[in-house]
Amino acid sequence: KAGVTQTPRYLIKTRGQQVTLSCSPISGHRSVSWYQQTPGQGLQFLFEYFSETQRNKGNFPGRFSGRQFSNSRSEMNVSTLELGDSALYLCASSQLAISSYNEQFFGPGTRLTVL
Amino acid sequence: AQSVAQPEDQVNVAEGNPLTVKCTYSVSGNPYLFWYVQYPNRGLQFLLKYITGDNLVKGSYGFEAEFNKSQTSFHLKKPSALVSDSALYFCAVRDPNTGNQFYFGTGTSLTVIP
């Protein structure tokens, strides 16, 4: 079974631009979560989608948004980029339905650099 | 309030010695606890989880973790460390009080010295 894939792997943008990151979960997984990883803050939860609906949202400004498609693929968008948005963005999928004990499987991440 | 804490940013251990990476949590009720490992330039890999039952959980690559409810801890252990175990380790909790959202610790960098 193929793992979680994220595209692109690396991205360089300038302040004020917007960016869209893509995530394809493991086949059969319906839950997709996004995290921001920085050296100082560790992993910060952005949001979680399940069956095209946002289930949970972390404490990030409205510039960060996401969506999930009917095939469970997910995109994350960041508008009006700031220097502080430079980070590794990780996507994770799980089989979560009603059960809450499923582990998450992570993709390799997208390294975003904002200049 | 932080739901999970990893008190050590860095742990060094000699190859062949036992290792412990500490984790404590502050979630009420019966949380679900996880350990993940991250190698350089890679995503996180699942190691093990505690849901219920036996307090000692065995996972991948010879790792195990002990759930201690009275101390609200879930320390990761391995009897004999390998140089290849050097990586960043994250403890995580799934909080049933907040829609089962995952909370991760800040990570502990483990270095196994040959």
Image (spheres, rainbow, N blue to C red):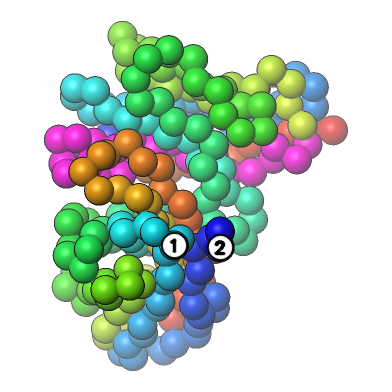
* Neighbours of disc 1 within 10 Å: few (<14), some (14-19), many (20+): some
**Is any part of residue A99 visible from this angle?**
yes
The residue positioned 32% from the left and 13% from the top of the image is B69
Report the quarter where the N terminus of chain A lies.
bottom right
The answer to whether residue A9 is left or right of residue B82 is left
Q: Does the magenta stretch include residue B102?
A: yes
Vertical placement of residue B9 versus B20, above or below: below
Count of numbered circles in the view: 2
Q: Is residue A6 left or right of residue B87?
A: left
Answer yes or no: is residue A115 visible.
no
Residue in the picture at 69% in, 40% down: B86
Q: Is mark 2 on a helix, strand or loop?
A: loop
- Picture coordinates of residue B5, whole percent (x, y): 37, 32
Please report contact status of discs 2 and 1: CB closer than 8 Å, yes or no: yes
Is residue B26 shown above or below A33? Answer: above
Residue in view at x 32 percent, y 82 percent: A81
Residue indicated by mark 2:
A2
**Is residue B81 one of those drawn in magenta?**
no
Q: What element carries label 1?
A: loop
Residue B56, above or below A49: above
How far from the left and from the top, in percent, is residue B84?
75, 40
Q: Name the residue beneath numbered marker 1.
A: A27
Residue A62, quarter of the rendered image: bottom left
Q: Are marks 2 and 1 on the same chain?
A: yes
- The part of the image, by quadrant, that contains residue A79 is bottom left
Q: Where is residue A85 in the image (x, y as percent from the top left)?
A: 37, 72
Is A49 drawn above or below residue B29 in the view shown? below
Residue range of the region highlighted in magenta in the rendering:
B83-103
